[in-house]
Image: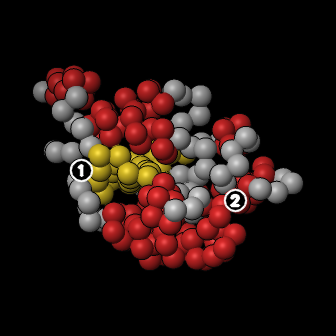
Amino acid sequence: MSLPKRIVLVGPMGAGKSTIGRMLARELGYRFLDSDRIIEERCGANIPWIFDVEGEEGFRQRETAMLAELSEVHGTVLATGGGAVMRPENHELLKRDATVVYLKTSIDQQVERTRRDRNRPLLQNDDPEAVLRHLFALRDPLYTGLADIVMFTDRKSPRLVVRQLVNRVNPKTPRHKRQVRKEGRNHA
């Protein structure tokens, strides 16, 4: 089995999609893409500004157009925004020629990782934890349904998560070969 043409990272805010994606791309020799950052670069404005001016629906339209464009680019690890799964038309774009990885993390970890981040418009209110709980209830079934791999990130370093993902997506790693040999002996 060879490496997938694309690896798409989905999951909630604070799951580590950008950090892990960048490291995973480097490890696999792939190009790293972050859909939110590309949208910001093309608009010349940050996501909170886009939300303020165009609303969430305007941002989601831009996101779908970006996902359509990036679904054609192979040899990449793509970090998506947490809400990319909310539009049904995005599901096929996320899965196209890709292995979808759900980076799953607890609400506590999300709160810890996002509490000082002012670049998350949905959390700019009096009770960000309640928002994260609500979003998790809505989005977790979608992330799980799209995922080829579910990887828990709580209390794991990004380096460990990347190592575990490489072992899952690249069967030519030494650990995998050892496991195959071991399983072969058990069945011989």
Percent position (x, y) of residue 58? 58, 76
Q: CA distance from mark 2 to mark 1?
A: 31 Å
User: Exactly how many numbered labels are in the figure?
Assistant: 2
Nearer-the-camera pick, 112 or 104: 112
- Looking at the figure, which quarter contains the C terminus? top left
Depicted 152 relative to depicted 134: above or below? above
Look at 44% across and 52% down and name the residue there.
Answer: 34
User: The disc labelled 2 sits on which kind of residue?
Assistant: Pro
Q: Residue furthest front?
A: 44
The reply to whether callout 2 and callout 1 are in contact (CB within 8 Å) is: no
Query: In the image, is 98 to the left or to the right of 64?
Result: left
Tell me the element at label 2: helix
User: The disc labelled 1 sits on which kind of residue?
Assistant: Gly
Residue behind mark 2 = 121
Residue 75: mark? 1
- Looking at the figure, which quarter contains the N terminus? top left
How was this image coloured? secondary structure
Look at 32% across and 40% down and name the residue there.
Answer: 25
The answer to whether residue 168 is seen in the rendering is no
In terms of sequence position, does the residue under pointer 2 or pointer 1 come before the other?
1
Nearer-the-camera pick, 41 or 64: 41
Nearer-the-camera pick, 61 or 153: 61
Depicted 111 relative to depicted 4: above or below? above
Percent position (x, y) of residue 148? 38, 53
Percent position (x, y) of residue 182? 22, 23
The answer to whether residue 63 is seen in the rendering is yes
Packing grade of label 2 (10 A; few <14, some 14-19, many >=20) is some
